[in-house]
Image (cartoon, rainbow, N blue to C red):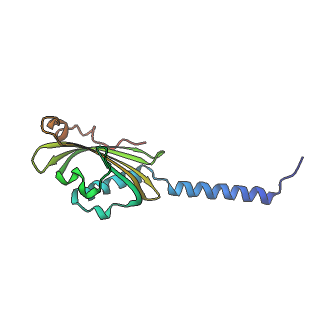
Amino acid sequence: MKKISSKVVFLALSLGISICSTVSAQSCDEACLTGHMDNFISAMLERDYQSIPLSSSAEVRENGPEIMLSNSAWNSVKSLRSRITFTDSHSSNVLSRVGVELFSGRPGYFSVRLKVKDSEIIDVELTADRRAGRVVADYVYNLDEMVVQTIPD
């Protein structure tokens, strides 16, 4: 039976700890993901697209097709009226379903999914439903407080 040097064991353990530290430092927990979503929604409402930390290879899609954020249906949003957020730190995804008031005065439903890696958003998936008669105003404007709380991991 071969003996393993204590230096080799120490080196292996050090590398393992170093790798684990790097992985956890790069991961985004619930607070991190929620912060990215808060910032994203604020920036979209303020039309401040440059402040969104998109990676250079980020893909942004709305209702299927790839778009520029500045061409999003968010341009028709006057105000945010309700929101529910789900985070998944294991996959680094955060999803918000929002009820909005449009500049036309009608309600709308919007959903946002962000994937975060190394403090940047690498994937954005947007859906928007603004069609008159399809959006139930009470579901946008009158949600119970319990429904609009952030759902933890």
Q: Position of residue 31 (x, y in %)?
A: 40, 52
Question: In this figure, what is the number of numbered marks?
Answer: 0
* Coordinates of residue 138 in the picture (x, y in percent): 15, 36
Tell me: 19 left or right of 44: right
Q: Is residue 152 left or right of residue 146?
A: right
Return the x and y of residue 29 as percentages of the image width and height.
Answer: 45, 51
- Image point (61%, 56%), residue name: 19
* Residue at far right of view: 1
Report whether 72 appears left or right of 23. left
Q: Nearer the viewer, residue 101 or 60?
A: 60
Residue 25 x %, y %: 52, 57
Identify the residue at the far left of this view.
Answer: 105
Q: Residue furthest front?
A: 65
Q: Is residue 78 visible?
A: no
Identity of the residue drawn at 24% across and 55% down: 71
Which image quarter is the C terminus in? top left
Q: Is residue 109 visible?
A: yes
Which residue is at 22% across, 37% downward?
144
